[in-house]
Amino acid sequence: MKKNPLIFSLIVFLFLSGCGSGRGGGDQTATLAVSLTDAPACGFDQVNLTVSKVRVHPNANASEEEDGWAEIVLSPPRKIDLLALTNGVLEPLGTTPLAPGHYTQLRLVLLPNTAESPLNNSAAPTGGAETALEIPSAVQGGIKLIHEFDVADGKRVDLVLDLDACRSLVQKENGTARLQPVLSVIPQEVSGEIRGVIGMNLSSGPALVGPRIAVQQEGRVVKSTFPDQNGKFILQPLVQSTTAGAYDLVFTAENAATSVIQSVPVSARKTTTINAADAPFLLNPSTIRTIRGSVTPTTAILRARQTFPPDGPTVEVRSINLVIDKGRYSMSLPAEAPSLGPTLRPDVAGRYTLEAAAEGWTAESRPVTLSGEDLTEEFSLLP
């Protein structure tokens, strides 16, 4: 299983269109156009990044000082609240000419925080004030992504950089947060989307609290979003199922039992609609229990997964990358029966597998059962 898969859904479209002279034999050039979007960030009301440029290079090992970079330069640099870009919203960043050829490295370059502009990159915890976002030295030359793609003379290639804020921010005990970027690449020409509507009230009537919809594969979140005020949601871009396989659609909320639609297909450049606006998907109410404890090291991600035997999926219900400096955590989970399609599964109620994982450490998993009481679980990972 991948450790530290990249967290703040930052989506970058790379439009490569032919038009001029360039590398790779021939006199055509391409155009690189970049747009930005994001998935929800758990525990934060704002996640602001000030983007100064996007860079692309044919050499995966090229340093930031080497020649041969093509760049999109934002002038002036643009401060963007990533959490305003959820549910399919995109923010164009600009374009640049690009020579045909083979490329392997992308970098998203941020304007650093300074004494004059201390909040160029910032975050606001839920209910808290905006504070400076700590940028590790490893990404100050640009958030690096290795992904091979070819640009032919006169052709266009669309890529998507997906940076997930929920797993890319680590909250510290002093109220600030550190950027720990987690990202992936999706070829736009082989991707589609899933759309639908979730009821904004529980099946029993009360309002739904904190609804979230995720597409997953084998218990790994591929993409997630919050619905709009009417319950509508869009999950895109998603690699077509003929390439990546089908997706499990997972519905969660802070006061609801989990619900899963298994094996939803996605086709290239098409929309998979799971329901009509007049038939919203309803979640059932649930008692919520809390698991508390600590994790060492503090860079760990803690996930709670639920499995539907004998041949159903395993899905992630909650994850926390907000382990504060001393390693304490608190995770709330539904104790009532989840649904798989139209079927309630009381045999799975309150049964989870907790997994703590951190890059460079051995992951640790253990089963837990939530019933009438909250639990305490301590994790100490081995190198």
Image: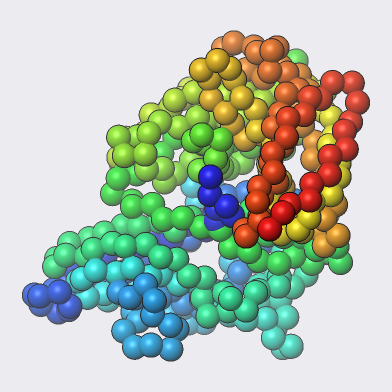
Q: How is the image coloured?
A: rainbow
Q: Could you tell me which residue is drawn at 79 percent across and 24 percent down? A: 369
- In the foreground, 105 or 192: 105
Left or right placement of residue 178 versus residue 332 in this view: left
Q: Could you tell me which residue is drawn at 54 percent across and 40 percent down? A: 220
Residue at the extreme right: 373
- In the foreground, 118 or 222: 222
Image coordinates of residue 361 in percent, x first then y, are 66, 56
Left or right placement of residue 106 versus residue 169 in this view: left
In the displayed structure, 81 sits above or below 282; it is below
Q: Could you tell me which residue is drawn at 10 percent across and 75 percent down? A: 25
Image coordinates of residue 247 in percent, x first then y, are 45, 32
Any part of residue 370 in sight: yes
In the displayed structure, 70 sits above or below 325; it is below
In the displayed structure, 365 sits above or below 265; it is below
- Which part of the image, by quadrant, shows the C terminus? bottom right
- Count of numbered circles on the image: 0
Left or right placement of residue 51 versus residue 352 in this view: left
Image coordinates of residue 332 in percent, x first then y, are 80, 36
Residue at the extreme front: 382
Answer with the quarter of the image where residue 46 lies: bottom right
Q: Could you tell me which residue is drawn at 31 percent across and 57 percent down? A: 158
